[in-house]
Image (tube, helix red, strand yellow):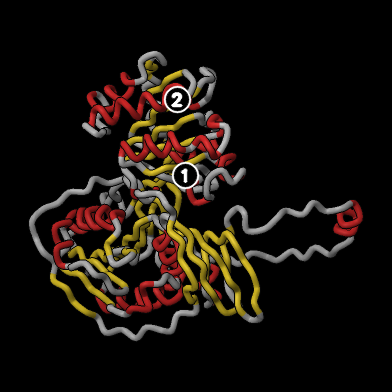
Amino acid sequence: MLAELLGLPYISLATRFELEGNKAVVSREIEGGEETDEVELPLVVGCQKGVAEQRIPNVRGISGARSKPLRVVEPKAVAPLTSLLSFSLPPAKAGVKLVSPDQPEELIRLLHEEAKVI
Amino acid sequence: MSVLIFIDHADGHVKKASWEVLCYGSRIAQKAGLAAEGIVLGTLSEELSPLGRYGISKIYQVAQESLNILDSAVHCQVLADVVQRTGAQIVIFPHDTAGKAIAPRLSAKLQAGLVTGAVSLPDLDQGFIVKKNVFSGKAFAQVSVQTPIKIITLNQNSFPVQESGGTAELVTLDIPVANPRVKLRSVSKSSGEVPLTEAEIVVSGGRGLKGPENWGMIEELAHALHAATACSRPVADAHWRPHHEHVGQTGLAIAPNLYLAIGISGAIQHLAGVNRSKVIAIVNKDPEAPFFKAADYGIVGDAFDIVPKLTAAVKKLRGLP
């Protein structure tokens, strides 16, 4: 949504991000694999785990952050397009059916004959 | 006045998730007294009109090859144009990579209310109320959509796919398509035989397998079951398996008919990705593993002893050598 409001390209689920001049080279997850794309800046990227190493700030950085100015921006009121009515819980599971480790083939039989998923 | 259904495709073929949204969209159209129409962006090698068997009467296609690569900005622009031309009131997407990227943009562009991850048909008796997954599948929320145009992404494996006779009329739309700003460099597909999100059966391995060298037995079991392979987060983090196989809160959310977890304790973050599976079966040597509370079937025992026996039993059942 942000990308659309800004009129920018958007790459979701990025697992790798590198800059090459005015271009970003981004790898993203797709169904059953990974795709590498090249996009001109500026753009909006949704990151997935693994895109960057976390950096632990040092003490100087933490104390320095305290003196940094904090600018508070007033939110803009917009009319909602949807509204949340209620929440509900999924039905509870009936409980696990245990199969003896001495007869693992019994599990396959149950999955085949009772659950009918094999 | 219609329900417009986004037909996602890859490698020249319609994705399985699209069949489901076609059935879902057709049912909504039936309930609301509207026409059900599909939209294809890009080019395919398979025939489109047989998709009428999922209940749609018409398929629009913008047959531009550049649309085969997902640039959500371009796709959104084209779809907005299609919505305007066809007077669509409800737009349905699968809740997959393309749907998740395009639907929010379209919502912002058309000022249309959006519900992501819907799990059942909307209630049309009192407005337009859609049930969706929240808190990583631990609960549902009822969301009311107030705008004239409504957009829904449907969670995969939430609606039964039914076929009937019928073919759809194919209408090619001539819509200007902007040059994509996203250019494809390379694609690497995973080695697994069955794509994870489309698999009916998924066999998954966790830390209990002790190392990547022990995955052979998981792959053998998966092969016998025609299943896809998956893994838990510690396994992906340790690079025992590729990251795109990771299911859970921060990985993929899947909903196969059978999820068979080997050596996974079933932490809540893992359950978030798999708790919509129809049947969950697990093998774990720790009887206190939380997964036993969420599973339908379980074996308390050593995976290294049990998995080969499961594979043998499946092979026997299927008559495989």
- How many angstroms separate mark 2 from mark 1 (CA)? 28 Å
Amino acid type assigned to the residue bearing label 1 in the image: Val
Chain letter for mark 1, please: B
Q: Looking at the rendering, which quadrant does residue B189 occupy?
A: bottom left
- Residue in front for this viewpoint, B41 or A53: A53
Residue located at (38% from left, 44% from top): B228
Residue located at (90% from left, 51% from top): A59
- Residue in front for this viewpoint, B215 or B173: B215
Q: Looking at the rendering, which quadrant does residue B26 occupy?
A: bottom left
B140 sits left or right of B206 in the view: left
Q: Which residue is mark 2?
A: B283
Q: Residues within 10 Å of mark 1 (few under 14, many from 20)?
A: some
- Pointer 2 with pointer 1, Cβ within 8 A: no
Residue located at (39% from left, 55% from top): B95
Q: Looking at the rendering, which quadrant does residue A33 occupy?
A: bottom left
Q: Which residue is mark 1?
A: B134
| Image x and y of residue B62, in percent | 28, 77
Q: Looking at the image, is mark 2 or mark 1 nearer the viewer?
A: 2
Chain letter for mark 2, please: B
Q: Is residue A100 visible?
A: yes
A110 sits left or right of B48 in the view: right
